[in-house]
Amino acid sequence: METTSRPVCCRAIASDELAAQLSTISHWKVQGSLIKSRLLYVQMKHGVATLKRILQGLSESDRATLTKTVFVGEWYELGLLARLDAAIVEALGATTPNLPEALGAFSAELNIGGTYESLVQRDVDGFLQLAAVVSPTFQTFGSARYEPETKSGPVRAGTVCLAYDTPPPSQYCQSGIGYFARAVELCGGINPTVAVTSCRREGAPECRFRITWKPSGASTVPI
């Protein structure tokens, strides 16, 4: 799995800058499955003690929510996810390069390979088209569509386009890079690459993730 082209929205920012970004989108919500995947990532890969230490660094209200049962089918404030991601990156980012992408990849494994296993198919284009359709299942903001490019030959390509009225918080798109790359692998794609070719936070009208891969059975020589 290879990821490239990280725009300004993928850079780490200070907590006060993140708070300012979140203040404009306080009504945005994400499904609990995304938050649950973060908690399980830390617990499974770094242990319960590390998870407790990270949660202790959050605000009392965030900590109260996250130490209770997080229900995968309920809606939670996007800010809760963003603050949790920032705390995880602050605690573990020095030893795990591109940690937001790893969090996104783990979310794909947990949600696509588990609850949404029925969506996984060997046709990567079909999955990405369907992923755009079911985007409202995971978040209450923005709209999504899929633009296929190359549907035959040794290398396939397509772009997932996400339109937002307001730019999403920093590093939200970076976790999307990992999510789409791992999702393509789960659908049988080989050597996927994901590049953010335009970003709402940089003034573009939408965030665009261009994805390339080799179909199942192709040579595994890197693209």
Image: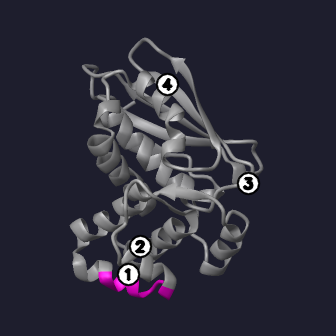
- Res 222 seen here: yes
As helix, strand or loop, the secondary structure at mark 1 comes to helix
Q: Name the residue under label 4.
A: 157
Question: Which numbered disc flags the more N-terminal residue, 1 or 3?
Answer: 1
Amino acid at circle 3: Thr
Which secondary structure, mark 3?
A: loop
Dot 4 or dot 1, earlier in sequence: 1
Which residue has dot 3 on it?
166
Labels 3, 4: front one: 3
Occupied quadrant, residue 201: bottom right
The quarter of the rendered structure image containing the C terminus is top left
Q: Residue 54 carries which label?
A: 1
**Of marks 4 and 1, the one in the foreground:** 1
Quadrant for residue 37, please give it: bottom left
Local crowd size for mark 2, using a 10 Å CA cut-off: few (<14), some (14–19), many (≥20)? many
Question: Element type at marker 2?
Answer: helix
* Image-quadrant location for residue 208: top right
Q: Residue 131, how many percent across, how many down?
A: 47, 34
Decide: few, some or many residues near mark 4? Use Cα within 10 Å; few <14, some 14-19, many ≥20.
many
Question: Would you say the magenta stretch is mainly helix, strand or loop?
Answer: helix
- Tell me the CA gap for discs 3 and 4: 27 Å
Disc on the earlier residue, 2 or 4: 2
Q: Residue furthest top?
A: 152
Marks 1,2: beta carbons within 8 A: yes
Count residues near mark 3 (Cα–Cα under 10 Å), then give few for <14, some for 14-19, many for 20+: some
Q: Specify start and end residues of the magenta stretch as a single range.
A: 52-60
Residue 197 placement (x, y as % from top left): 63, 40
The label shown at residue 88 is 2
**Which mark is nearer the camera, 3 or 2?**
3
Which quarter of the rendering shows the N terminus? top left
Q: Three-letter amino acid code at disc 1?
A: Ile
- Magenta stretch containing residue 196, yes or no? no
